[in-house]
Amino acid sequence: MPRLDTGQPAPAFTLNDQDGRAVSLSDYAGRRLIIFFYPAAMTPGCTKEACDFRDSLDRLRSEGFDVVGISPDKPEKLKKFEEKEGLTYPLLSDTDKAVMNSYGAFGEKTLYGKKVTGVIRSTIVVGTDGTVELARYNVKATGHVASLRKALKLDA
């Protein structure tokens, strides 16, 4: 699936969160939403990234952003991840990878020098009007929130 660009409408979705509740993009209408796609709960890189968002959440919310994480994990695993790491935002389950595909966050990537198909660590910021404000692909797990803040000019 092609990657998203600034100004494109963000693809609509409804996925179950770690508690089995349906969460939709439309639930965030009128708010800015940071969606981060990650390969697997409870792996070292994904844990660093998820905890970075957890630790930055109050500040991001005060600047008008909500955060959701999306992975191919089942809700039960996401619940364990939430509890183990004290995560305080929705973790959404995309087991069939349909949402990841629609956002360009699943496909061919290079992993340890080999071409593989999988989740592309990505972050999409959806603006208040439902369009893509920022799209970043192949992001690094460590220092990602700081990089995102800089790109959004939040630390100016």
Image (cartoon, helix red, strand yellow):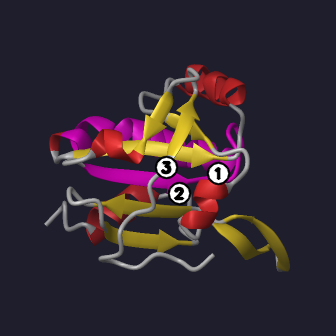
Q: Earlier in the sequence, mark 3 or mark 1?
A: 3
- Dot 3 falls on a residue whose secondary structure is loop
Q: Amino acid at mark 2?
A: Thr
**Distance between mark 2 and mark 3 Cα atoms:** 27 Å
Q: Is 60 displayed left or right of 86 in the figure? A: left
**Residue 6: mark:** none
Residue density around tag 2, few if under 14, some if 14–19, many if 20 or more, within 10 Å: some
Q: Quadrant of the N terminus?
A: bottom right
Q: Quadrant of the C terminus?
A: bottom left
**Distance between mark 3 and mark 1 Cα atoms:** 25 Å
Residue at the image point whose x is 46% and y is 61% from the top: 123
- Dot 2 falls on a residue whose secondary structure is loop
Q: Quick check: 102 above or below 30?
A: below
Residue at the image point whose x is 56% and y is 20% from the top: 19
- Dot 1 falls on a residue whose secondary structure is helix
Q: Is 1 displayed left or right of 95 in the figure? A: left
Residue at mark 1: 45
The magenta-colored residue range is 32-61
Q: Earlier in the sequence, mark 1 or mark 2?
A: 1
The reply to whether dot 1 and dot 2 touch (C-beta < 8 Å) is: yes
Q: Picture quarter containing residue 53?
A: top left
Q: Position of residue 17 (x, y in %)?
A: 54, 31
Residue at the image point whose x is 30% and y is 43% from the top: 28
Residue at mark 3: 13
